[in-house]
Structures are given as C-alpha cells and as structure tokens.
Amino acid sequence: MAKSLRSKWKRKMRAEKRKKNAPKELARLKAALRPDGTGDISMKDVAEIATVLPADKLLETAAEDAPGPDGPGKMDTDSKRKKNTMLNEHGQYPAWMSQRQVKKMKRQRLKKKGKHGKKKGLAW
C-alpha cells in the first residue's frame, strides 16, 4: 500500500529530518551517558534499575553462552517431528501450516499408502 505521492513525500521529508537531527541527537545521547558522571544520567542511578557490567565482562559471559557441541546455546527444537510427513508423535501438523497444506500432505500420505477409502455417492 502506501505508494501515493503524499506518502512518498512524507517519507522523504521524515528521512531528511532524521538526517538533519542525527548529529544533535547523537551529541545529546553522548552527553547524557558520559562515563565520568557529569551527564544527565549517572551510572549510579542506572545501577539501581539494571546490572551495569564492564564491556570485557560482558564479552566473557557472551563467550560462555556461545553454542558448542553440548553447550548451553543449544536450542530446544521439536525434533520428534517426521521430516517427510511433518507429523509429530501425536499425529498433529505444525501450527504454522495452513489447512490447504495439511490437506495436500494428507492426500500425498494416503496416496503413498494406497488407501483411497470409499468414494462418496451411489455404489452401483
């Protein structure tokens, strides 16, 4: 959507405004967060709200959490799902799969087994 001339002009003007105000905004941010404590915000005030760590300590903790062979960075995934049928151990399809895809997978699965079931209608 948003392809009208008015919206294009507004986007252009917002971008120019961001460019114009970026140096001032950066200077205000640096002034507020001066490490010597002379800024608007002191680290002592922030320490009450959040844990303040030096950068080297933060990098060490990030390295410990890095994924390894059996490290803590391993993500818990649904590995009990069959890759070809997309069914889990309870016979359920994933939540993100649409009903159209579910029906398609079901047709393929039944076709492969050779079970078509009874056809509806009159049996002459």
Image (tube, rainbow, N blue to C red):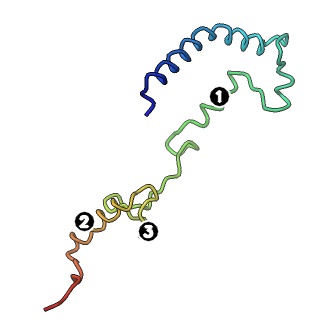
Q: Residue 1: horizontal and vertical position, in percent?
A: 43, 34
Residue visible at 56% across and 42% down in the picture: 73
Q: What residue is at 66 percent from the left and 32 percent from the top?
A: 61
Q: Nearer the viewer, residue 11 or 112?
A: 11
Q: Which residue is mark 3?
A: 89
Q: Secondary structure at mark 3?
A: loop
Percent position of residue 70, x then y: 53, 46
For residue 29, side relative to residue 122 (left or right): right
Q: Earlier in the sequence, mark 2 or mark 3?
A: 3
Judged left or right of residue 106, residue 77 is: right
Q: Which residue is mark 1?
A: 60
Most distant residue in the bottom direction: 124
Q: What residue sits right under mark 2 in the picture? A: 108
* Kind of residue at disc 1: Glu
Query: Which image quarter: residue 85?
Result: bottom left
Give the residue displayed 46% in from the left and 21% down from the top: 8
Mark 2: which amino acid? Gln
Q: Are marks 1 and 3 in contact (CB under 8 Å)?
A: no
Q: Is residue 23 above or below residue 56?
A: above
Label located before the other in sequence (1 or 3): 1
